[in-house]
Image (spheres, rainbow, N blue to C red):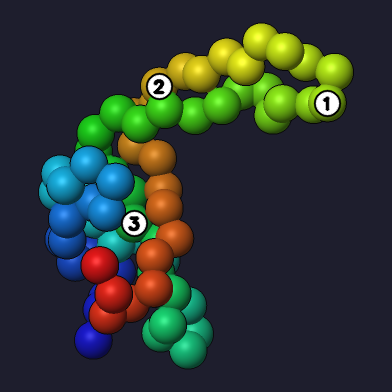
Amino acid sequence: MTEVGDRIRCPKCGRESRIVWVSQDAKLAGLKCAGYHSQISPPPTKFSKNIQTKTKKGMVFLIEVGKE
């Protein structure tokens, strides 16, 4: 069973990450990665042509528990 504080590999970059949240039915978990990941900011609109990305450290991803 996955618990808060467990360490697993990030599905995006493969680095070590930590579980910070588990849903009540234990089917979803939020994991915080120690690496840098790209994020689109601000969200693109139909009128914007320039999509700017920036990197952030410590992003949280939702994953299905038992799948990697």
Q: Give above or below for 3 relative to 59.
A: below
Q: Nearer the viewer, mark 2 or mark 3?
A: 2
- Per the rendering, the mark at residue 46 is 1
Residue at numbered disc 3:
31
The answer to whether 34 appears left or right of 21 in the picture is left
- Answer few, some or many: residues within 10 Å of disc 2's Cα (few below 14, many 20 plus, some between 14 and 19): few
Q: Quadrant of residue 59?
A: top left
Q: Amino acid at mark 2?
A: Thr
Alpha carbon of mark 1 to alpha carbon of mark 2: how far?
23 Å
Q: Quadrant of residue 22?
A: bottom left
CB atoms of marks 1 and 2 within 8 Å: no
Task: Give whichever of discs 1 and 2 has the lower sequence position.
Answer: 1
Question: What amino acid is found at the position of numbered circle 3 in the picture?
Answer: Leu
Picture layout, residue 57 above or below residue 7 = above
Secondary element at image label 3: strand
Q: Nearer the viewer, residue 28 or 13?
A: 13
In this rendering, is residue 35 above or below 53?
below
Which is nearer the eye, 65 or 44? Answer: 44
Element at badge 2? strand
